[in-house]
Amino acid sequence: MKLKSGLSYHVNIALALSVIPLLTVLLWPEKARALETRTSGTAGITEEEALKRGERIYREGILPSGKPLTAFVQGDIPVSGKTFACVSCHLRSGMGSFEGGVVTPPTNGATLFRPPKMFYKGLEVKSLPTRRPAYTDASLAAALRFGIDPSGRIMSEIMPRYQMQDKDMELLIFYLKVLSANFSPGLSDSTFHLATVVAEDVEAEYRNAMLGPLEDYVRRRNNAAARRASYPPPGSSEATDVSSMRLSLSVWLLKGPPGTWRSQLEEYHRKEPVFALVGGMTKKEWRPIHMFSEENRIPCILPVADFPVISETDWYTLYFSKGFYQEGEGAALYLNTIEEALKDKAIVQIVRESPEGRALSAGFEETWEGMGHGKPVTVALPQGEALTGGLLQKVADRENPFALIIWDNSEAAPAIGSMLDWKNRPGMIIVSSGYLGKGMWALKDEVRDFTYITYPFRLPESEERYTGIVKSSLGIDKDPGDTTAISKKAYSIIRVLNDALLGINGQYYRDNLLDAIDMGRGSAGMGTVVQDETYPLYERFSFGPGQRYSSKGCYIVTLSKGPKPQLIKKSDWVIH
């Protein structure tokens, strides 16, 4: 026999020797029971701590020792760390995936420890010769280590063979037993209980622009579910037919300062547990609701929030974008493409001390410094202090910047207009369309050539058709006016939610709802939950595994001259 390498030789010997205890397990049941006794339990620690450690192995590929999980794939290729952690293929919910032609089966507690159920046209097939027995602790450990299932079949070489000590294997198996073992809270009487969170600071017209379409969607869907219940399709299985499930939608109104919101949310949820939060709106930071969702493991789908939590690790809230932070991010990415901006001249930002100003500044600074540049010069502009041309000139004379970034509201437009006669005018002014608002259109013709604007939406000429589509879909019979953007977001919330509910395939776990969105499981099968070109407002709108911001970019534009200015694209869609 020709060996491929010394490593291959040692791996093959190790696998051959490992078959001996495996055969003992398969041929002598009493030995299997003894091994199962050793691998059960929680390794002498509390169940809470055991679950925490097992979860970290499953999700992060990190052992309790702090070392990365190690494994072999394709027979003899060593791998380690998060890339080959269980969650990478079996997903957060443990419900498995289908990607690149590879089917990854479920590994959740409700599936592993009983023979798998197979359905054909909604009816269970019980006589398939290839059905495996239910896993036990011992046979599951053997599968994880050696890639052999309880019926003795060899698993695909794509499945890693994990190198784990018994105590670590115990923790992982203990976690798998509770992973998606029971349907999540928020289900009763064939009904998904949902809620939307709205703060009292939101004006009625904006609140209604979101709530009206959501409530209408719930009514229409429930009417359709009632019709299906009256005339079920032949051979349908109630347990897997999500289209027959009803929805209820509660409005959780938050009052008072954000510091009191958490206790209000907990009380709402105590009285009525929900399967997920959908939409929602506040003019303040979303953080209290975000942390409530994160700590209670409740999905929150597309809240209307200008100040989302910026995190690369949190899981339970899916946002439209990073809000104002994303505009700052886009400005930094654009400046990084300009050769003159990368020379020794200073980059200066003037930041209004406000939530908008702080978010814009944070997005710019963190992105700019993350690309290896020095910290920009930052000038704070207190609330109540007017931004004047004199202040701008003073800063420009002192710093001689290449770019002067002004994170301020509509009152900044007159100050920018005063730069026309400056001898040392910066080569570029950057402002935010979101913060400058309607003041953007008040910029003087003479400053429009060198005033660059962050614009995190689809350009108007390609967005026009969506207003009619949204009005028709939502049954809006008049111009939404200032609430147009809210109506378009409500349209997207409904589409993502509807496809996600269909994509969970009767497996009613909260994490599976999010996995369905991440993996693109929808009404027409795989890859249909989010399609960039069919969603309004944003040039690119998509999710993927672990992605929590659907829109990930920004245009940089200037204004044309004249009384009816148009946006002039100065960059492609700058993606963070």
Image: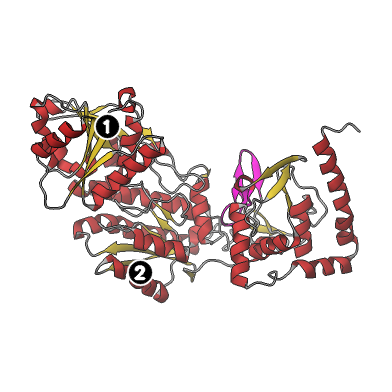
Q: Give whichever of 531, 258 is nearer the camera.
A: 258
Q: Residue at x 40, y 76 (%)?
A: 271
Tell me how the rendering is colored. secondary structure
Task: Label 1, secondary structure: give it.
Answer: strand
Q: Which residues are drawn in magenta?
A: 85-104
Name the amino acid, label 1: Ala
Q: Is residue 425 above or below residue 512?
A: above
Coordinates of residue 122 in the picture (x, y in percent): 62, 56
Nearer the observer, 68 or 342: 342
Q: Secondary structure at mark 2?
A: helix
The residue type indicated by label 2 comes to: Arg
The image quarter in which residue 29 lies: bottom right
> Residue 202's image quarter?
bottom left
Image spot of residue 283 (x, y percent): 25, 56
Quarter of the picture holding the C terminus: top left
Give the residue at mark 2. 262
Residue in view at x 40 percent, y 49 percent: 495
> Does 332 appear above or below 496?
above
Instruction: Give the image location of residue 382, x and y in percent.
Output: 16, 51
Q: Is residue 70 left or right of residue 344?
A: right
Left or right placement of residue 444 versus residue 175 in this view: left
Mark nearer the viewer, 2 or 1: 1
The residue indicated by pointer 1 is: 346
Q: 10 Å neighbourhood of mark 1: few (<14), some, or many (≥20)?
A: some
Marked residue nearer the N-terminal end (2 or 1): 2
Q: Note whether 270 is above or below 206 in the view shown.
A: below
